[in-house]
Image (spheres, rainbow, N blue to C red):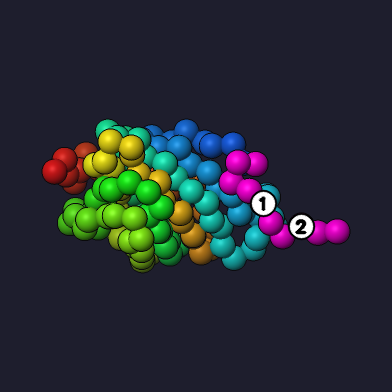
Amino acid sequence: MKKYTIHEDDVAAKKLEGREHKMVIQPATMNAKNMCAGTAFFPLNGKAPPHVHQKEEEILYVLSGEGRMYFNGVAEELVPGTFMYVPQGIEHRIMPVSPEGLKVFYVFSPPVIQGSYEKKNDANQEES
């Protein structure tokens, strides 16, 4: 019988720069064809590099902690319950600000390969 559920704890975290990333739903785990979803945890002082998804849209939702999401260098505040939409081609990055770090749920469509989209651009990284 095909199973349509999976627990986050059944997927190993992948260490990416500034965060731990669990892609829970993806072609390899659930045979998803048009999307992928999972969680990412950013410890305090963990900063993912700015990056762009050329072909994918992304939706994120703050599960716990506080932080800032930078869209093309402009910060927007994040608290639990905040949804974020990242269109194709928009440079973005997350910076946690709370001591407990920041945990988000995300969905990509179409699916991505973890970390394949990262683009460093130190000139655009804001620290405040």
- The residue lying at 40 percent from left, 37 percent from top is 19
Q: Position of residue 115 (x, y in %)?
A: 46, 43
Amino acid type, label 1: Ile
Region in magenta = 1-10
Q: Which residue is mark 2?
A: 3
Along the line of sight, the residue nearer the viewer: 47 or 3:
3
Disc 1 crowd rating (10 Å Cα; few below 14, some 14-19, many 20+) is few
Q: Position of residue 42 (x, y in %)?
A: 37, 40
- Check the image and report above or below for 47 versus 32: above
- The residue lying at 16 percent from left, 40 percent from top is 127
- Check the image and report above or below for 111 versus 119: below
Extreme right residue here?
1
SS of the residue at dot 1? Answer: loop
Left/right placement of residue 1 relative to residue 111 reads: right
Q: Is residue 57 magenta?
A: no
Q: Position of residue 75 (x, y in %)?
A: 19, 55
Left/right placement of residue 104 relative to residue 31 reads: left
Q: Position of residue 15 (x, y in %)?
A: 47, 33
Q: Is residue 79 visible?
A: yes
